[in-house]
Amino acid sequence: MIESWKTRHTFMDDVNIITKLFIGIALFFMVIFIHNFDVMLYLVALMFIFMLFMSGAKLHILMGFVAFTLLFALSSSLFMIFYGSGQHELFKFGFVHITVESLVRGLHLSLRTLVVSFFGLSIAFSSQVITVFYSFMQHLRVKPKIAYAFMAAFRMLPMIIESFFQLRNALKMRYQIIQKQHYRGIRRIFHLLIPLLSQNMRKAHRLSVAMEMKGFRDGPRTYYYKTSFSFRDLGLIGCVIVIVTFAFLLSQFIPITGILDVR
């Protein structure tokens, strides 16, 4: 998570990443077996509110990710909507055959995607890369050499981006004295790609040698950060259970569509 995107520290920031991932996986399998359309509608709405409060991110940043999530959810269901089967036809043109049943099934698939995505965004905005891998090492017995290698790789991403912009600016200056046929089309890509790969391969090699010299191996070691479980983990589990229960209750007492089974 990029710290500049955060505006406040939330309750979910202090929850162990393993607990958050466990809840996310459980939520994924749970929505697969929910076929009540109203339950999914309420679950999406409640999970969206949960994300707004628990992410702690800037609103415009969060809405950008939400817009991308909505686009992805709708696009993933288009195949089911356009080529589904059903008795109540809405639109037909060539291979495209949209029915009420296919539309409901496609939207139901989108709602499943949104529920998991909103909780996933909450995890992403409330977790740090360092604590993720420290928790994996201390509780899931991931080898330190592997975990630290991934942490180093994440730390190198800003360096790679910076190198790309430096190289691009340098090439703009050099292209002023070079004929255009020497840097058109695929050659321009090679001028960027080959130096960028060679530079970062050297950086990665130097980093791996330094890590070996510093003792980043698979043996027992101490840790600078301690990631433990607390009452906040139980609180998050209880909060998600309340959200799911509330969605089921609302669908029974305040139904929106009355569609009980989309299969």
Image (cartoon, rainbow, N blue to C red):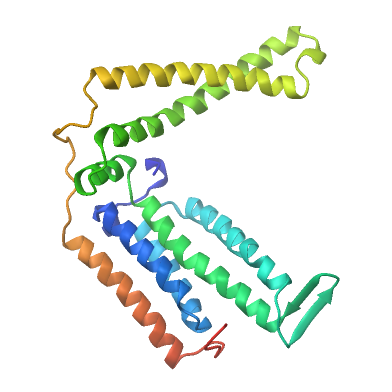
Q: Is residue 152 left or right of residue 194?
A: left
x 42%, y 28%: residue:
156
Where residue 161 appears, as percent x and y from the top left, is 51, 28
Where residue 238 appears, as percent x and y from the top left, is 26, 71
Where residue 260 appears, as percent x and y from the top left, is 52, 89
| Residue 56 appears in the figure | no
User: Which residue reaches farthest front?
Assistant: 218
54 vs 214: above or below: below
x 45%, y 16%: residue:
202
Quadrant where the N terminus lies? top left
x 73%, y 71%: residue:
82
- Between 203 and 48, the one lying in front of the other is 203
Q: Is residue 113 left or right of residue 121?
A: right
| Residue 47 appears in the figure | yes
82 vs 57: above or below: below
- Between 118 and 150, the one lying in front of the other is 150
Quadrant hosting residue 186: top right
Where residue 85 appears, as percent x and y from the top left, is 71, 79
Q: Is residue 10 left or right of residue 93?
A: left
Q: Is residue 239 left or right of residue 45?
A: left
User: Which residue reaches farthest right?
Assistant: 94
Quadrant hosting residue 89: bottom right
User: Which residue reaches farthest top?
Assistant: 177
x 74%, y 77%: residue:
98
Quadrant where the C terminus lies? bottom right
Quadrant hosting residue 144: top left
- Between 14 and 218, the one lying in front of the other is 218
